[in-house]
Image: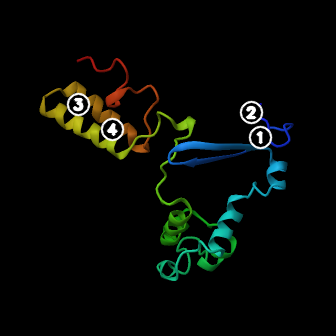
């Protein structure tokens, strides 16, 4: 069982709020669903988004005019998104991108995620910079005529097409003990 609700102390906390200021953790609140609902803290994301879209945080008219009137893939109209606060398909993210970016910037201060990586993905995600580093190493290995190392790097780069790195990987993108140099 996880943490207990800080309000009632009886049920497992399912809703967790963390307030962070100036990159320092300030406050953590852990509530069960009934207590969060009672305190109006268990707001569902779609209703929160609907409130933001309808409320004072809505994008400017110029930002709203920059998006098409509907998604070209599923046909969801922008006015329906604005009314319901829900997107219809993955293509909606691209179709309504200017409005979504503006909303994220107004709500979070940025449209780029800069928070923590979920524990289940730690050591799994690979960044563009890491991929470029591997490609640079491959080029250097070929120039130095280190063909076995170059082949391992080439195979590694090919396997990363999904954007993930196996967790047993060490620095430089190769498995521990694979270097043999």
Question: Would residue 171 be found to the left or right of residue 102 on screen?
Answer: left
Q: Nearer the viewer, residue 60 or 164?
A: 60
Which numbered dot is residue 150? 3
Q: Upstream in the sequence, badge 4 or badge 3?
A: 3
Q: Upstream in the sequence, badge 2 or badge 4?
A: 2
Which numbered dot is residue 35? none
* Residue at figure coordinates x 34%, y 17% from the top left: 177
Q: Upstream in the sequence, badge 1 or badge 4?
A: 1
Distance from disc 3 to disc 2, alpha carbons, whole Å, reads 47 Å
Q: Residues within 10 Å of mark 2 (few under 14, many from 20)?
A: few
Residues at badges 1 and 2 in contact (C-beta under 8 Å)?
A: yes
x then y, percent, for residue 165:
43, 35
Query: In this orientation, does residue 85 appear?
Result: no
Residues at badges 1 and 3 in contact (C-beta under 8 Å)?
A: no
* Residue at figure coordinates x 50%, y 60% from the top left: 109
x then y, percent, for residue 42:
76, 54
Q: Nearer the viewer, mark 1 or mark 3?
A: 1
Instruction: Tell me if residue 165 comes above or below residue 66 in the rendering.
Output: above
Q: Nearer the viewer, residue 55 or 151?
A: 55
Q: Nearer the viewer, residue 57 or 47?
A: 57
Q: Residues within 10 Å of mark 4 (few under 14, many from 20)?
A: some
Q: Which residue is mark 1?
A: 13
Q: Which residue is mark 4?
A: 157
Which numbered dot is residue 2? 2
Query: In this orientation, does residue 172 appear?
Result: yes
């Amino acid at each position: 069982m996880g943490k207990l609700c800080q309000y009632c102390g009886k049920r497992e906390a399912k809703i967790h709020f963390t307030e962070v200021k100036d990159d320092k953790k300030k406050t953590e609140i852990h509530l069960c669903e009934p207590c969060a609902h009672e305190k109006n803290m268990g707001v569902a994301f779609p209703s929160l988004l609907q409130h933001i879209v309808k409320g004072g945080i809505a994008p400017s008219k110029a930002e709203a005019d920059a998006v098409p009137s509907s998604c070209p893939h599923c046909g969801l109209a922008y006015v329906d998104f604005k009314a319901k606060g829900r997107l219809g398909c993955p293509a909606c993210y691209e179709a309504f991108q200017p409005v979504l970016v503006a909303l994220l910037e107004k709500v979070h201060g940025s449209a780029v995620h800069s928070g923590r990586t979920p524990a289940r993905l730690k050591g799994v995600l690979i960044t563009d910079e890491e991929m470029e580093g591997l490609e640079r190493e491959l080029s250097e290995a070929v120039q130095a005529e280190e063909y076995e190392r170059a082949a391992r790097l080439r195979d590694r780069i090919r396997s990363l097409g999904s954007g993930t790195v196996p967790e047993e990987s060490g620095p430089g993108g190769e498995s521990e003990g694979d270097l043999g140099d």
